[in-house]
Amino acid sequence: MNPILIRGGRLIDPAAGVDAPRDLLLVDGKVAAIDATGKIKSVDAEVIDAKGLVVAPGLVDIHVHLREPGQGYKETIATGTAAAAAGGFTTVCAMPNTIPVNDSAETTRWMQSAERGAVIRVFPIGAATRGSMGDALTEYGSLKAAGAVAVTDDGKPILGDAIMREALNAAARVNLPVIQHAEDTRLTGGCSMNAGVVAFRLGLRGMPVEAESGLVERDIRLLAEVKDSRAHLHVAHLSTRSALDAVRRARRNKLRVTCEVTPHHFVLNEEAVDSYDTHAKMNPPLRSEADRAAMIEGIIDGSIDCIATDHAPHAVHEKEQEFERAPNGITGLESALGISIAVLHVRHKLPLSRVIALLSPQPAAVLGLKGRGTLAVGSSADVVIFDPAQKWIFKASESKSKSKNTPFDGWTLQGQILTTISEGRVVYRRS
Amino acid sequence: MSPRTQGRKPPAPSIQTAGVPPISRSPVSGYPIHPGSLLSCADLSVEDVGSILDLADVLEKEDPVRRDRRLFKRRVSLLFYESSTRTRTSFELAAKALGADTSLVSAQSSSIEKGESLKDTGITLRALGAECIILRSPYSGAPYLLAESTGLPILNAGDGMHEHPSQALLDLRTILAHLKAGAKLSETTLKGVTITICGDIFHSRVARSNALLLPRLGARVILCGPPPLLPDAAAGVAPGVVIERDFDRALDQSQIVMMLRIQAERLAGLALDLDEYKARYQASSERIAAHAPEALIMHPGPMIRGLEITSQVADGPQSAIADQVRNGVAVRMALIVRALGENGSSRRQSRKRTSR
């Protein structure tokens, strides 16, 4: 592996508080040096000219569905990570709702094996309960030893009070967060979008806001009960103002609660379902305009810890069904940065360093991924280089993902990614 | 704006963000929606409604031999995923009265049972020569998928809880005949008319289609029923629609009353005290005599006599239930002619695939 010298760029490393012109030297998969422009000399390094470009720590997505094992027709670890690299990500955390469910050390290791062909770092997230059935806990210690960075039954909630309390305690003992897909499924049977006027007009059963906020409140109550264990609850894909308010209150009470929001929940609302567009069907559903605005507000005021894509690839024939029959979810890895810059930075004037913080050091911190999300000397040589001013058109047909199920096809986004480097290797280069 | 969104509320401008256009739909399947389709009452302008009803009048009165030539040997498919008596029979009679050949595909006796998708079923029917598909589906929005999958004109004969536009049009025809409304249909034709729709609004595609259609002609629509069957959100379905939970008070204001069946098959575990329901919402002769002695009583069927309506009312002098059924054939003839264009006028569509 040749050293890489990235020269002349604007280096934004929010974790180190750097936003200045800097050169960056990567050697042996690590950040070897950072210095003022022109100061670093390296005879054997490949030089990347980053003049006019932003050089940032590789993005970290703590919520992706790579569909392996079991559903390679939707995505594989190889294609999913190629899509991630094209989207500037160098670390992704893979949800366990595979077939079979990743509830064992064996599957956790299988997912990280070199044979999977991942081009960036994949950290599996283990199932919180066996088969994600919500009955019996998996072995958190051995999942962690095999490389799992959190536990969850994502796609489904951990519904029972007793099992959730057990999960929080057991995860705390091995210092893993419990990620909750907060949906009280007793309130959402047969539902396929957000409850409200739009759902009524379309004749679709709606998921009430309370299905999310009620479970978040329940989880926070349980967390307060087991407070001494220092358990960490992470709320996945938060989508409602009331759930966000519950998280804010819990934080004021010094509870260890973090949360993520997806780009689609801060840029789209329920009107996108329009005439049964299955690319606007996901779970949690797109919410009201007020809830969407609350997500933006939460990002700006810092209540939301990070952006995660919930990248959920599905085959064309699966989405080409009646709305109620089509599966939930959209792809997200290749549009996340472009949407975040266009919406949060350009429209809402959030500094670029904060946008990067939400996509890199902050998600890394949520799951305790050491040496990721920063460009400090000695950390992993994970870098994304992009042109922050360049507008570009996102085309689903050009996606590296096996699946093209995105509502953002044809959108003009901002911030074109030119190079992604994972552990010192160039894994994506815009041609 | 995509054809799909014609007549619908455009996406909220608030989702437009700098550098990000509003969603431009890339249809999952390749075809634009055929203009001869009728998927939702929201897609019809007042002029469209007027011309459909005018055509229904012409066709109803026309010499059957002449009428038979209008769509002679044209192919109409009826694709029914749910059981139906009135809608299926009247669409079929309507197509046959125009000379068209009809074929019926129902879920129980076709490859649908083997798991064939709606898209593939539609493509198969098109390959067999179908020029128009009349679809009934238990899934809201299914006609949009079929329209985009085939490019054919699709007539929505009821989709889940969404809409039943031909029913709303035949209801309108029934109402106009009762009110002896003459001349050209306009935005004020039903000004001063209050119509109460009572019962299981939540599960009713008939209620949604009527609530979208009737206010456009100036009517005031009152929705009536208990909260589990009539969520507050229903009032937002269209301007001119209000909720009144007291049936007597709703009746006091109404010239037209539509009763709806409780859709036991869609209740999904919802527990309802039927005795209490009858006490508060049944159209009984006593209640009608006390609160709406002059009103026209309608019901799209099927009725559950003794539940939402008593036999005395259903069979009584104020009932227009049989007129509704009769009007169904005339209105559906007009919709089929609108979908196919007439023989000789050559509106057969080229089947050009749009880019995916």
Image: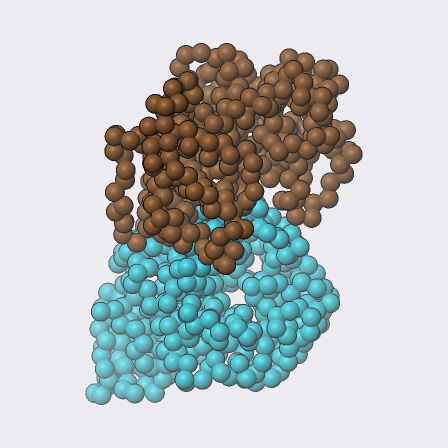
Chain colours: A cyan, B brown
Residue A72 is left or right of residue A146, and the answer is left
Query: How many numbered marks have been drawn onto this rendered protein structure?
Result: 0
Relative to A146, say whether B155 is above or below. above
Farthest residue in the front direction? B65
Q: Nearer the viewer, residue A284 or A346?
A: A284
Residue at 38% x, 76% y is A78
In percent of width and height, residue B58 lies at 39, 19
Residue at 55% x, 33% y is B86
Q: Nearer the viewer, residue B206 or A225?
A: B206
Quadrant (top left/top right/bottom left/bottom right) for the C terminus of chain A: bottom left
The answer to whether residue B83 of the structure is visible from this angle is yes
Q: Which of the 4 quarters of the picture holds residue A5? A: bottom left
Relative to A326, say whether A361 is above or below. below
In percent of width and height, residue A329 lies at 47, 59
The answer to whether residue A264 of the structure is visible from this angle is no
Residue at 27% x, 49% y is B354
Q: Which of the 4 quarters of the picture holds residue A380? A: bottom left
In percent of width and height, residue A224 lies at 70, 64
